[in-house]
Image: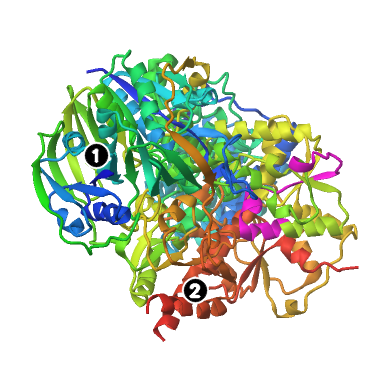
Amino acid sequence: MMYLSSILLLAGLLAAAASFFYTLYSIFWNALRIPEKKIKMGLSIGRRIYLTIRNVLLQGKLFKDSSGGIMHALMFWGFVAFAGYSATFFARGIVPSYQLIPAGLFKDVLFLTVDIFALIVIVDVGYAVLRRWVIKVPRYQGYNGFEASFILFLVATLMVTYYALGVLRLDGVSAGITGAIMEGIPASYTPISGFFASLFPGISGSSGLDLYWILYGIHAIDFIVFLAYIPTSKHLHLVAAPLNVLLSKDTKPAQISLIDFEQQKRFGATDIRDFSWKDYMDFYSCTECGRCTYNCPAFLTGKTLSPRDIIWDLRKVVMEEGPKLRHAGIEEKDKILTPVIGEPISEEDLWSCTTCMACVEQCPVMIDHVEKIVDMRRSLVLNQGKAPKETIETYTNMEMYGSPWINDPSTRGDWAKDLNVNILSESQNDDFDILYWVGCVASYDRRNQDIAKSIVKILQKAGVRFAILGSEEKCTGDPAKRTGNEYLAQNLATANIETLNRHKVHKVITGCPHCFNSLKNDYKEMGLEMDVIHHTEFINQLISLGKIDLKALESDDKEKFTYHDSCYLGRYNKIYEEPRTIIKTVTSNFEEMEMNKSKGLCCGAGGGRLWMNENVGTKISHKRMEMADKVNATTVVTACPYCMIMLDDARRVMGKDEKMQISDISEFVASRLVQN
Amino acid sequence: MPLNIIVLIKVIPDLEQIKANASTGEVQTDRIPLRLETLSENAIEAAVQLREKHGGKVFGLIFGKQESAPLMKKAYAMGVDEGTVLTGYGENNPMHTAEVLCQKIRTMQFDLIISGNQSADTYTGLLPGIISSKLNINLLSNALTLSIDQATITVRSSLDRKIQNLSSQLPAIVSVTQETNQPRLPPVMQIMAAGRKQIVTEAAQVADTANVKRISNKAPKSERRKQLFEKTDEGIVAIVKAIKEEIR
Amino acid sequence: MKTLIFADDGEIAGQICSYLKTGTENYVATLPGEESKCGKTGAKQIFVLNGKPDSSNVSIALKELKDRESIDYVFIGSTAFGRDVAGKLSGLGNMKPLSEITSIAFKDGIAVTTRFLYGGKSVLTEESNSNLFVTAPGISEIVQDKPGSPVQQLNLNDPAVKIVGEEKKSAGGVDLEKAKVIVSIGRGLGKPDGIPMVEQLAKAVKGEIAGSRPVCLDYHWLSEDRQVGLSGKKVKPKLYIAVGISGQIQHIAGMRGAKTVIAINKDKTAPIFEECDYGLIGDLYQIVPKLVASLLA
């Protein structure tokens, strides 16, 4: 009997392990053989270890959603402890006399941990059931199918049978037989099991033993099924997610790879070969948890875009086409692989993305959704010339005028003509310390010209020797890059880099977070090294250095300020505190809106959306203005011209312009400068 | 049936950047960047779409100046297979333009000529008709849609007050409108291939028989009052008064 | 000096005829049903071209008339059909055409003309010995104060192209060229939902609604025949109210003839403010309802 059980257990375990590793093999074959996209791994070992400890062992990113996060962390830690138990369980099951972990304090503490966590896990499962089917947490809706229920069932059964076995273990009955792994553990180290045991009446030796075998069998089968099931389900994340964190590509996931147009033959992501192995790890790591989707501004305002579905759809295609390719041979790619755009991923969804990075920020397993979306946009734009009509017009303008709008480039610096500013296109006088990069919006849009003028006022007050490029400045290429037109983006960047080098610019301040991100990160990748500072940082420095002083306006007492985070300043470049510090040096009448800082809701303009129509659902900017209204804000401070355009428009259209104004941080400062 | 299509492409100075001299009012066009006339882009797109459907070749013809030549690259990128730039364009003179183009066209094999119906700079709109007469081929103008079946072309022609469905045997000349299609963004591969393609330049063989003498070319003067109001209520009072005067 | 005037729209033929006034002997050719629109504008003779007109048979007929009547100058109304005919006739008769003229005067056998160039950014004044003038619609008001001109029916040849079918354009019966008051909307309206509000304004000033190119052709908020601009209608109302129109030069070219122009736009630097008599800077969604209220008060 004991002999037979050992064989059965071993066979079951081997079969499960074989299935587990075969599935993993096929999955990793996909990840290593299909992708053709090359990536750079620009992260230090130390940083990787830090990220792994923080985000895997300590479950750091999960706590961005606190209730779900705590639930998962407890489950995770419970499972880590339980792994030790299971190893011992199977070791003893196969060779009854074998002690995997020698008796002693370590083993006792391990069992104590397991004994406590098993209960926590059961409670957790109960909570999960509550969240999914009773409270109906929105982000799970539609994802509560067989897989979710089955996994919870397996987990609960595993824990319940653990306790049942613990109850029955009681020495003398099962001692010394297969799997009686608690043998020798002092009862004080399994207090919960002991407590449950105390609830049940004693059981006779023979019937107790029968029951023991049944429970033992259930526990073993449960584990074996779980093991085999993991890699085929979303629980692949147990394997993939820790690896994904350890193999993080970069600290800046928003960095979109360059295309070498001379060398590369395929542009963007058309089918699954056009992703990188790291993208595959992203697919495998996804747990369908939905944090991405439920922080996505497009989704939150009624568009059909769901970052979760994008990842999951791509994963499905990989899982379907991968095996076909493996059997047919890797050279059959052209025959087997099918485009992923259109079906399953709609073009409309790709164009709905504002590239705000809320999804990436929230993802606990460090998936980069945005890069994949931009890669698919690239496929449409660069290979087929497909983009929304307005976007194509934008491209034409950027090419023709160096601005996304129809603007006569010779008038670019006109706003500064009477301000005593060194306009390089006219003066060609390179005697300056810092270049103020104005950007298209502040150069041409009347409302935003006030921002440019405020920045000039501040710089002049602080005695900064600065210059602007005037008509030599062109769009940085950000709207082209984020909509997938890498070709145009690189052309513009090349022209700008040439101009910047010609004027020997080594330090730049800009009032536009999109220009800022381009100049600081994208241009750096193209070989331009400059010190790039956003005006929020610069103004903050000027204040702390005492170069400028601010004084509250009398009206400030009656005002309520709030700050709207720009995605390209916040999530992209981690500048959250500077603008808040500036506001708070002047006034304490400040209140945060919901969704702030790293959770900040996009204004709806990024990723080239500023130039597209927003016709589905409500406008993102309107949702944001409602949030501002909820805290009774009278002034919404921004630090981005895109946000200014969107929120200012929303304010007018929603009829809130009497009670609310939008003000750039530079305007806020310029109007409160102490004159001396 | 594979088609040989000639598409007539116009290069114009970018109208957005044309400015009048502040003191003289004379309009200056020198050093203004050149671009393809938008209707020429529609014409190219229409030609390329027909080629994609029926096979054949799209031949681009630009009549312009030496500086116009690089613009042929854009046409190549949009899908034009081969092209010639005829130089020697002087001022707007449709009869001369037509004669230059016809001389070249007479040396070529073609089934269809496509051009824009009017150009944004001169707004002439005579060229399709003149060429039609000179080459003695039918004109199907202002196409909203165009399709070819065997050697017959069918066009939905948009006139001011009606739409006509026209058909004709090939060869013919068709003029297109902005509604005909939405020119696609050229794929990068095509842009890069266009960069490597050769541009043939030929001097026009016909002398310009200019019969028009330009007296002045000035920005139209506005004699409006330009009373601007930033305060809504104040403005409304003034405007209501003005409106009531006009609609009395 | 004999002129032959052709327009497929009798109204435009009448405008040209009225413009040329005396000093020329004007022959008019037009299509059936159009002759009454220019019947009393002083033409010596009106020819009605019967049959299935296309640019080919009409240009042949005009050439024959021109030769028969020893015509010195041909004027053709600038419509889509008119320009085709003008082109065909120029090629056929080896004429010297001049396009889109907005005025003409003869001085010692030389024609002095004006026309817009560069999408309306400039006005060309030219001297020429041209003998075919494509004439912009609205060169003059139509004046029907002369005795009725004699009408002669002519038959056209068969058309060169096959006319398979014909449909009227879905016009809302709007005649912008004749409207005395026009309220015109532009991209600045932001959304078609704003149109009812503008209609209130149009009602208050008893005007027609018109729009800029993007509004009519790109977004289809209004029908195509309501487009004002170089490529649309050229209008001459007494009052033109531009709501949310930035004033691209192509649009200005279509409304230059307006007597009084009022502009409402949130962008202070919008070019429309250079082309208006009264300009109100601000949000149109606030201004228009207030304006309507004041007008009705």
Residue C71: mark? 1
Residue A427 belongs to the span the image colors magenta: yes
Q: Tag 2: residue type?
A: Gln
Q: Give coordinates of residue A210: x percent, y percent.
A: 42, 44
Which quadrant of the figure contains the C terminus of chain A? Answer: bottom right
| Chain containing the residue with disc 2 | C
Nearer the observer: mark 1 or 2; the answer is 1
Type of the residue with mark 1 = Ile
Q: Label 1 neighbourhood size at 10 Å, few (<14), some (14-19), many (20+)? A: some
Q: Is residue C162 left or right of residue C223?
A: left
Q: Which residues are magenta?
A: A425-452
Which is nearer the eye, C205 or A63? C205
Instruction: Looking at the picture, tell me which residue is in the foreground, A444 or C111.
Output: C111
Eyeballing the image, is A651 above or below C166? below
Q: Is residue A395 magenta?
A: no
Residue located at (39% from left, 27% from top): B97
